[in-house]
Amino acid sequence: MRLDREDVAKVLSRLVGEEISIQALNNWCAAGKHNRRFPLEIAKALVMITGDKRILEAALQPEFGVMDDQAKIYHDYGSNPPEADP
């Protein structure tokens, strides 16, 4: 299901506990609004809504990355992924 910006604003507001307006979303997305930065503290909520981790990847330095679900399993259990057969 595709959400429009109004729906995203409503769900973000509920998840973060503060009002996020559609105008705020529009400002954050506008290429010409260099003085309107996306607040990273709500990035997790946006990822939860959209399922898209690119906002987090863009915020991190190149030497860092975002774990996919398989990597998270290994991280949580403290083991390394099995080595592939040569």
Image (cartoon, rainbow, N blue to C red):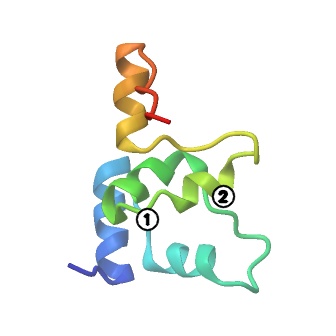
Which sits in the foreground, 80 or 77? 80
Q: Which residue is mark 2?
A: 58
Q: Position of residue 80 (x, y in %)?
A: 46, 20
Q: Position of residue 34 (x, y in %)?
A: 79, 75
Residue 69 occupies quadrant: top left
Residue 1 occupies quadrant: bottom left
The residue sitting at the front extreme is 86
User: Residue drawn at (43%, 65%), measured in percent from left and top?
Assistant: 20
Mark 2 surroundings: few (<14), some (14-19) or many (≥20) residues within 10 A:
few
Q: Position of residue 10 (x, y in %)?
A: 30, 68
Which sits in the foreground, 19 or 40? 40
Q: Earlier in the sequence, mark 2 or mark 1?
A: 1
The residue sitting at the left extreme is 1
> Real-space Cα distance between discs 2 and 1?
21 Å
User: Residue drawn at (42%, 13%), measured in percent from left and top?
Assistant: 78
Residue 63 occupies quadrant: top right
* Direction from residue 58 to residue 21 in the image, left or right: left
Q: Nearer the viewer, mark 2 or mark 1?
A: 2
User: Residue type at mark 2?
Assistant: Ala
Which sits in the foreground, 52 or 10? 52
Q: Position of residue 48 (x, y in %)?
A: 33, 54
Which element type, helix, strand or loop, lies under badge 2? helix
Q: Which residue is mark 1?
A: 20
User: Residue type at mark 1?
Assistant: Ile
User: Residue drawn at (41%, 15%), measured in percent from left and top?
Assistant: 79
Which element type, helix, strand or loop, lies under badge 1? loop
